[in-house]
Image (cartoon, rainbow, N blue to C red):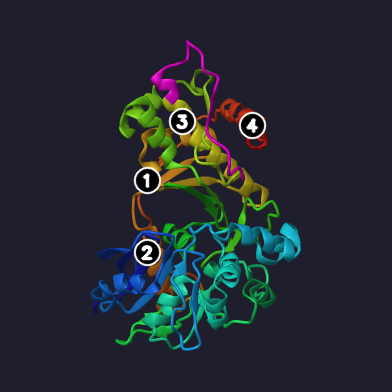
Amino acid sequence: MTEALVAGVDSSTQSTKIVLCRAGDGTVVDEFAAPHPDGTECHPHHWESALDKGRHLLERAAAVAVAAQQHGMVALDGSGEVVRPALLWNDTRSAPQATRLTAELGGPARWAELTGSVPVASFTVTKLRWLAEHEPELAARTAAVLLPHDWLTWRLGERRALTTDRGDASGTGYWSPATGEYLPEFVSAAIGHEVELPRVAGPNEIVGHLPGGAAIGPGTGDNMGAALGLGLRPGDVAVSIGTSGTVFAVSEVPAADESGMVAGFADATGRFMPLLATLNAARILSSAASMIGCSLAELSELALAAPPGAGGLTLLPYLDGERTPNRPDASGTLTGLTTRNATRENLARAAVEGLLSSLADAIDHLTAQGVRPRRVLLIGGGAKSEAVRRIAPQIFGKPVAVPEPAEYVALGAARQAAWALAGTPEPPVWTAQPVQEYDGPPTPHVRDQYAELRDRTAGWQHHREDRS
């Protein structure tokens, strides 16, 4: 008998990726990818068009699930038609609305208690308020609000039911991870009237079927899909070094950080997933390589040739402002430069140590929310750097594992589809991706050096504003 296949979809900001896997062990048997338009808003039909190009993979699957970019606002009218192009997570026009909503509905402490997070411009609830203030006619037409994965799941199931999952719902700003319930008063306060919201399905529930009969899993947000694809367990912290940095973990208890540093999301399994993001990550390395005049591979070699601490050089890598900590007007700061340590090797080392120290700060914030990290998993383009891999355990003070590059969001969606197909209490145990292990003696003096600079420059942006 032929083993069942399952399909996982990753509908990201940039593209649709599909993996077709064996349901029993997760072995990938086929893949597909198609691009999305650039921008911070996008009509959902572009996502559907990209997905349709990979229908030949979905038609071979016994079950399908979709993981997609979090937070995007898909507004529908009473007949189910899209009211306007979806505002995506990276559309920051609703930043003023985030500030006002936070104040209007009880302040940061109340938001953290009820929603697990303090809203920022990426969150769906802030985009609803922007719609009400700037496009009131469209806001009045809005009868239902979905997230990108909700809309794609609904379309795959022939528009029969509006569903979501707790992981993606936890990024809206109007659903409580702690209670598992919507906060309709937050929605009404944002858009000005009641709207239909998708039912929150169970983690392994079948929410519909494709025309050919394949089961449809509930789907989830992209970060939750990545955690499921990585097989993240309590004690693991994932550090993704892409254009931006993302640090997240699976936890048995919900997070509620009123500072706004930690987003207290839920995961795709019934647990919780505290998460932080940094604006600056892999670009720190590319910027340093450009400044020194070398390739990324050469930057890695130079960094490994310098001693820990880079001869006294310290880089605070807030090149384009920063979100963690919240310093939108900050810039990068390099200190400790002398004629003795002004070498390419030390500059390269300072860049790598600055990147990793920034991410170590994020891990510390997770620890303050009850996460007990035992191991760090490094993923993303920046994890290809040998210097990042070897220096990371020294900065983090934890062993580091680097999984083999893979489409982890799509794999997580496929694993969820297999789980829905099996109907078991826990997700199927799939063959783990090969990892390379790294360890090394901690270098606390590097973190101390970095922390001193971070704290000393905390008020600099305000001084700069005062002079302008």
The kind of secondary structure element at disc 1 is: helix
The residue to which callout 2 is attached is 410
Q: Which residues are magenta?
A: 326-347
Q: Is residue 255 left or right of residue 276?
A: right
The quadrant in which the N terminus is found is bottom left
Query: At which x and y percent is residue 384?
Result: 35, 41
The residue shown at (55%, 19%) is 336
- Count neighbours of disc 3 (C-alpha within 10 A) and say few if under 14, some if 14 to 19, many if 20 or more: many
Q: Is residue 119 left or right of residue 378?
A: right
The quadrant in which the C terminus is found is top right
The residue to which callout 1 is attached is 381
Query: At which x and y percent is residue 299?
Result: 36, 29
- Count neighbours of disc 1 (C-alpha within 10 A) and say few if under 14, some if 14 to 19, many if 20 or more: some
Pick whichever of labels 4 and 1 is earlier in the sequence: 1
Q: What's the residue type where badge 3 is placed?
A: Ala
Q: Which mark is residue 351?
A: 3
Snapshot quadrant of residue 63 = bottom left
**Front disc: 4 or 3:** 4
**Front disc: 4 or 1:** 4
The kind of secondary structure element at disc 2 is: helix
The residue shown at (64%, 31%) is 457
Q: What's the residue type where badge 1 is placed?
A: Gly
Q: What's the residue type where badge 4 is placed?
A: Thr
Real-space Cα distance between discs 2 and 4? 40 Å
| Contact flag, marks 4 and 3 (Cβ < 8 Å) | no
The residue to which callout 4 is attached is 457
The kind of secondary structure element at disc 3 is: helix
Is residue 433 something that shows in the picture? yes
